[in-house]
Amino acid sequence: MSDAAEVKSESVITVLVAALMNLGIAVAKLVAGLLGGSAAMVSEAAHSAADTITELMLYIALRNSVKPADERHPFGYGSTQYMWAALAAAFTFVAGGLFSITHGFHSMNGGAEGDYRISYAVLAISFVLEAVSFGRTIVQLRSESRHWNVRPRLFLRHTPDTSLKAVFLEDLAALIGLVLAATGLLLTEFTGNPVYDGTASVLIGVLLLIVAVLLGQANLSLLIGKSLPSRFQEELRAELEAGEDIAAVQELLTLQLGPTSVMVAARIDFRDSANGEAIERSCRALEARLRERYPMVRYVYLSPWGDADLTPR
């Protein structure tokens, strides 16, 4: 199995595990919130429900993005993952964040009565389950960051696998949201003031909005078309300049077509001694070397540097 296929398989499993856990957690939170009269618990239920729908959309994105290239889509369907992920972020923004904020404000004037014991039990179980899901995401994150020899934080910031980024941020937000909900419940129970429970609901909504905005920005930038990070561009340039009969790489363009698909285009200044046959042989060797070292490089376009410069002016 190729590195790209392994990453894709890991991402699918990670998304499905998170979705199944969130579905069960959402039902439990809703029941506890309705029985106990807690706005924070109902908001947490909306939070988990939004995460479940989001992860199902990410699953659809992962499945669609691996479809092979065809005549109408010669570069494949990798970018569809970013479209679905951007829609998932928008859903989180509307269904999760705005609902939690409005519900929290409305509940601040309500009564503080209710039996919160079920809510505490559900919060504790939810925290354990979310921690398990988050732990799996951390394992995948560390594994992939070691593969590229970068720190996990840097990998998470630049990875084109936005499904991994989405699950990481959603699991982290879920754990923080559970702490906020528990704090709001405790303060409301001890003081009899529903403002604390409502405030916890509002804060959970704000947390969801932050996650939605971060994921939306990440996916839209890739959907529009984004180059590789400067470090990898420098590595690609070094690989090209190490080729036979290469004097310099005058122009290098990269484009992230999908989580496991990259296009590389370069204009190369060959040595004066290189004839047409040597240039063709060198280009074939460079393309093979790039594909071998970087499996995500699917498309390579190399052309000799000449008097006619294609760089926009």
Image (cartoon, rainbow, N blue to C red):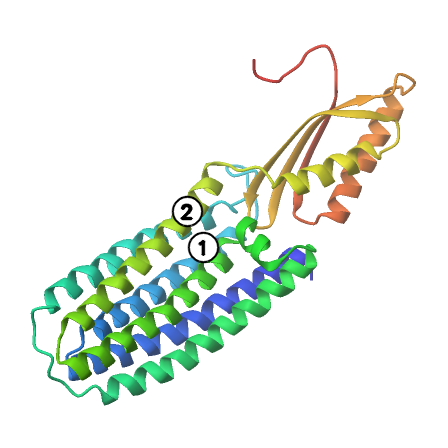
> Which residue occupies the extreme front position in the image?
191
| Secondary structure of the residue carrying numbered label 1 | helix
The answer to whether residue 295 is above or below residue 255 is: below
- Whether label 1 touches label 2, CB < 8 Å: yes
> Which residue occupies the extreme top position in the image?
307
Disc tally is: 2
Q: In the rendered structure, which amino acid carries the disc numbered 1?
A: Ala
The residue carrying pointer 2 sits among few (fewer than 14), some (14 to 19) or many (20 or more) residues within 10 Å by Cα, namely some
Question: Camera-side residue: 220 or 112?
Answer: 112
The label on residue 83 is 2
Residue at the spot 35% in from the left edge and 67% down from the top edge: 52
Residue at the spot 39% in from the left edge and 58% down from the top edge: 57
| Secondary structure of the residue carrying numbered label 2 | helix
Please name the residue that numbered disc 1 is placed on. 61
Image coordinates of residue 113 in percent, x first then y, are: 10, 83
Residue at the spot 7% in from the left edge and 77% down from the top edge: 111
Instruction: Classify residue 226 as left or right of residue 212.
Output: right
